[in-house]
Amino acid sequence: MPTEIRMDDYRHIARLWILRALSRPEARPRLRHVYETTSILETLGFRVALSSESEIETLEALDKTGPKDARQRVIASQVDAWLTKATRTSEELGVSIPDPLARNLDLLAARLRLTEVEKGVLAIRAVYEIDDDVRGTIDALEAKTDPRLARLLAAMLCETPAAVSSALDPRGSLTSLRLIDHSTETASFSDRVQPIPGLVHALLSVHRSMESLLSFVVQLAPAPSLGDEHYPHLREHLELLTTYLGHALRARQHGVNVLMHGRPGVGKTELARIVAHKVNASLYEVPEHNVASHPLQPGVRQQSYGLLQGLLARRRNCVILFDELEDVIPYGGQSPFWIEGRRSLYRKAWMNRLLETNQIPTIWVSNEISHVDTAFLRRYSYILKVEVPPRSVRRHHLACQLRSFEPAEGFIDRIAENADIGPSCVHAMRQVLERTSTTTAQLERRFDLLAAERLDAMGAPRTRARYPFPDRWRREYVNADVDIEALTDRLRRSGRGNLLLYGPPGTGKTALAHWLARQLDRPLYVRRASDLHSPWFGETEQRLERMFREAMTDGAVLLLDEADSFLYDRRGAQHSWEVGHVNELLTQMECYDGVFVCATNFRDALDEAASRRFSACIQFSWMRPEQALLAFNDALAKLGIAVGDSGPLHERIRRLDRLTPGDFTAAVTATQFMQQTATAEGLLTRLAEQCKGHHGNEGRAIGFCA
C-alpha cells in the first residue's frame, strides 16, 4: 500500500529547478512579477544578496523594461550573479530527484520505455502538485506557448528544448500512452500538461511492488463465478470466440476488439471473464473509480485505457475489459461528446485508430449500441449480442443461487418465467435474504417484495406480468384440432410462426402459449388491449411497434390476448384511427421474425385479412370425456381426496360434455379458498355448475347439468 507523501524530501530538487528557471535570460522580464506576486525569491535568500535597501529601487532594477540608471544596473548585475552562484552551488551539492519519486519513475520507464527527458517532465509535473514554490515559479513565468514551455522545462532539466518538445509531442510516449494530456488550448501549465488522475499520487508514494504503483490504473479482474455451462444458449459463440481470441493472443495480433452488448443484467461482464479464463489470459479491467472510490469521468477512463495498453504491451496472454462503452462512444453520434473544461477529450479519428492499432485484445461491454457509428462497428473483430437467458437457464441459475433456502419447485418455476429478473438481480437479492436470516417459509414473500421494488426501479414494464401458469396443467387437457407436439417441433425448427388460438373461454389457449414458450425455452411476453390502447393519436401504433420490437430483442414468444380488440373487421370501423390500429398490427405480423400467438374467443369478429397472415389457426374445443376424467383425477390428487370405488364418479364426469381445463382450476381454487372439507362429490357438483353455465339457456341438459 502507498505511504504518506513527505513534501520536505523535495525541497532541494525544487530549489534547483527554480534557480535554473529564473537564471535564464528569458526569465529576466518576469522577475519583477515573480518578486511582487510570490515569496519565492525571499525564500531563496534573494534580498540578502542585494546592496540596495530600497524596495522601489529593487523593483525598478527588476522591471521588464530593464535598469534605468547605473545604480539599478548594479542591482541587476547582483541579481544575475546571485542566481548564477546559487544555481551552481545547488548543482555542486549533487541534488537529484529523491525516492520514492526517482524509484517509481525508473519502474515506470522500464515498463513503458520512457526517455530521461520524459521522466524529467513527469518529475516536474509531480512536484508541481505538492510544492508551492515550484508551482508559483512556473505559473509566474507564464510559458503560454509550446516553444516557451519547452525552453522553460529544458532549462530546469538541463536538456535541450528540442528534446523536451519531442517529449511533449502528441506522438510521443507521454501523450500517446495517455500518461499526460498535453493541451495547446490553455495557458496554464497545470492544464497544458495534465497527468492522468492518480498518477501523481502514485509516483510520490512508496510502493512495495510494481503492482502497487500501477494499482490506480491496473485492476486484475476477479475470476468468473459462473462457467460456460451457464450460457448454453451461447455455446456456439463461446466456442468460436475463444478459438479466435486464443489464436490472436498467440500471434500477438493487433486491432482485436470484441463487442458484447445486451440489456442490463444478462451476464455480459461475467461472460467476458469466462472468455478470458477459457483462453488462459489475465483479464484487466479499466477502472471505473479512483483510489478514493470516486467515479472516474469518461475522459479519464479513456486515458486509463490508453495507459493500460502501454503497460501491458510487452506482456503475453493479457486481455483488457472496458465496461460501459458509453464512456468512449457518445449517445446521439455527437463528436466531440464529452466536454471537460474547455476542450473535448474525444475525436472520431482517435477512436478509429484505437480500434485498429490496440496491441492488447479488448472486450468492450455495452447495454446499448444503437447510437454507435457504423464506422466504429465495422472495426470490431467480433460482435456478440448477449440475449436474455432462456427459461431453462434462468431456472437452473435460480435453483443454484437459492439452494440454501430449499425453495419450492413451483416458486422457482414462477420466478423463472420473468426474464427481467436476471442473474445480477438474483445475486443481489440473495445477499439480502442471507443477511436477514430468511427462512424457507419466508422466502417467497420476501423475494417477491424485493423483486417488485427492484423491477419498478429498473423501469421493467408491468405489461410483462404474466397470467400465472396453472399448477399441474398438462398438455393432454387441450382439445385442439392440431397435433400440439408436431406443431411444437415445427416451431422449434423454424424459430418463427404466427398462431391464432380460438375457442371458448378456459379451453387452455393462454396456458398453451405458456407451455409452448417453455418447450421452446423462450420467455413469454403477454400483452392485452389495456397495455396497448392509448387516447393519444398515433401512440397505439407506436406501442404495437414497440411490443414486437421488445419481443424480438429478447427472443420471446409474444402472446396478444383478446386479439379481437385489435384485429376486428375493418369494414365495421367508425373512425380512421381504428383502421390504423389494424393496419399496424397486420404489418408488424408480416415482418415479425419470431413466434407470435393471438388468442381470442371470437374468431368470427376478426378481419378477413388477418386470417391469411396466420401460419396456423387452431381451434380449441370442450374437453373430451377421457380428458375430463384425467383432469378430474388430477384435481382429486391435488385436494388430497382418496376415492374407493371411482367407477360411478367416472361415469358421471364423462357425462359433463362442456368442461374446460379452466373449470377444473376454478373448482380446485374455490374449494381451497373456502377451506371446506374437500370431497369428490363436492368437486363434481362444482364442475356440474360450471358445465351448466357453459350450456346457458340453450344448452342440452344432461347428467348433472339437468
Image: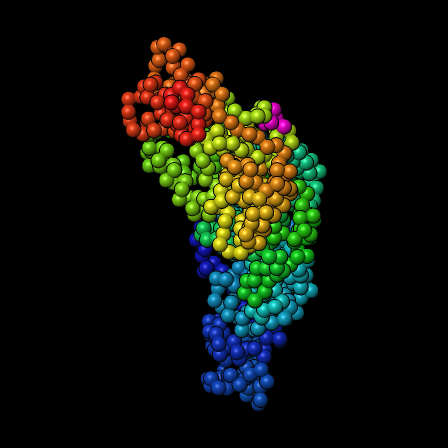
Residue at image position (45%, 40%) is 465
Q: Give the percent coordinates (x, y) of residue 534.
A: 49, 52
Residue placed most toward the observer, 703 or 396? 703
Note whether residue 25 is visible: yes
Residue at image position (50%, 40%) is 562
Using the image, determine if residue 192 lies above or below residue 57.
above
Residue 34 located left or right of residue 612: left
Where the C terminus falls, by quadrant?
A: top left
Q: Give the percent coordinates (x, y) of residue 300.
A: 55, 55
Residue placed most toward the observer, 356 or 491? 491
Q: Quadrant of residue 90?
A: bottom right
Q: Residue furthest top?
A: 645
The magenta span reads 486-490
Magenta: main secondary structure equals: helix
Q: Say how the picture is coloured.
A: rainbow
Q: Give the percent coordinates (x, y) of residue 294.
A: 46, 53
Residue at image position (66%, 57%) is 348
Q: Quadrant of residue 193?
A: bottom right
Using the image, determine if residue 91 lies above or below residue 234.
below
Q: Give the percent coordinates (x, y) of residue 581.
A: 56, 49
Q: Quadrant of residue 64?
A: bottom right
Residue at image position (68%, 43%) is 381
Q: Count the labels in the image.
A: 0
Using the image, determine if residue 231 lies above or below residue 356.
above
Q: Residue furthest bottom?
A: 69
Residue placed most toward the observer, 699 or 590? 699
